[in-house]
Amino acid sequence: MYEFEKLEIWQLSLELIEVVNKSSKKIPYNDSFGLRGQLCRAALSTSLNIAEGKGSGSDKEFKRFLLMALRSIYEVVAALKVAVKLKYFKETEIKPVLALCDKLGAKTNKFISTIKSRIENS
């Protein structure tokens, strides 16, 4: 088992990938914005950045990758909001995904704060 696999935020990011992949199928494959693919890539990027950051070897680099993961979570949220605006989803349909993004974002922010404290105290 790799170290990143033990992280709760990485495990949550896998849930996000699964939920986004399933729900994105409601977006037409050939939508003019490429929204479906972008939504899936943003969810995947969250997970990949957490894993890559954990393997970076330094707290400073790990923090940088966690910030990128956090931005990818925001991208998922923004893409879902666009999908609602384009009437691919109803607001109620994306609530569970947004709740997962909120949970993952909060835990990622907490992790970033912990690492930031470690950096400042070293």
Image (cartoon, rainbow, N blue to C red):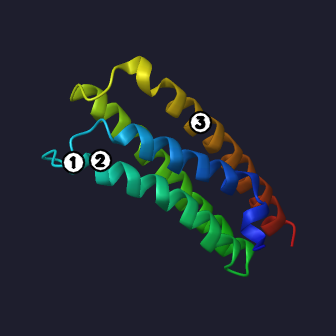
Quarter in which the C terminus is drawn: bottom right
Q: Position of residue 22 (x, y in %)?
A: 43, 41
Query: How far apart are the alpha carbons under marks 1 and 2?
Result: 7 Å
Residue tagged 1: 29
Q: Are marks 3 and 2 in contact (CB under 8 Å)?
A: no
* Residue 61 horizontal/vertical position (percent): 64, 74
Q: Which mark is residue 36?
A: 2
Establish if 14 lies above or below 94.
below
Count of labels in the image? 3
Q: Residues within 10 Å of mark 1 (few under 14, many from 20)?
A: few
Query: Residue, x 65% and y 48% (percent of image)?
Result: 12
Residue carrying label 3: 100
Q: Is residue 66 left or right of residue 77?
A: right
Horizontal relation, residue 29 to residue 101: left or right: left
Choose the circle earlier in sequence order: 1 or 3. 1
Quote the CA–CA distance across marks 1 and 3. 24 Å
Depth order, front residue of 1/108: 1
Separation of disc 3 and disc 2 at Cα?
Answer: 18 Å
Indicate the secondary structure of the residue bearing disc 1. Answer: loop
Tag in front: 3 or 2 = 2
Find numbered disc 2 in the image and state the secondary structure of the residue it sits on. helix
Q: Amino acid at mark 1?
A: Tyr
Residue at 69%, 73% (x, y): give it.
Answer: 60
Residue name at image x 55 percent, y 66 percent: 48
Q: Nearer the viewer, mark 1 or mark 3?
A: 1
Q: Crowding at label 3, few (<14), some or many (≥20) Cα neighbours within 10 Å?
A: some
Query: Looking at the image, is mark 1 or mark 2 earlier in the sequence?
Result: 1
What's under tag 2, amino acid-wise? Arg
Helix, strand or loop at disc 3? helix
Q: Position of residue 110 (x, y in %)?
A: 74, 47
Mark sitting earlier along the chain (3/2): 2
Q: Is residue 117 above or below residue 109?
A: below
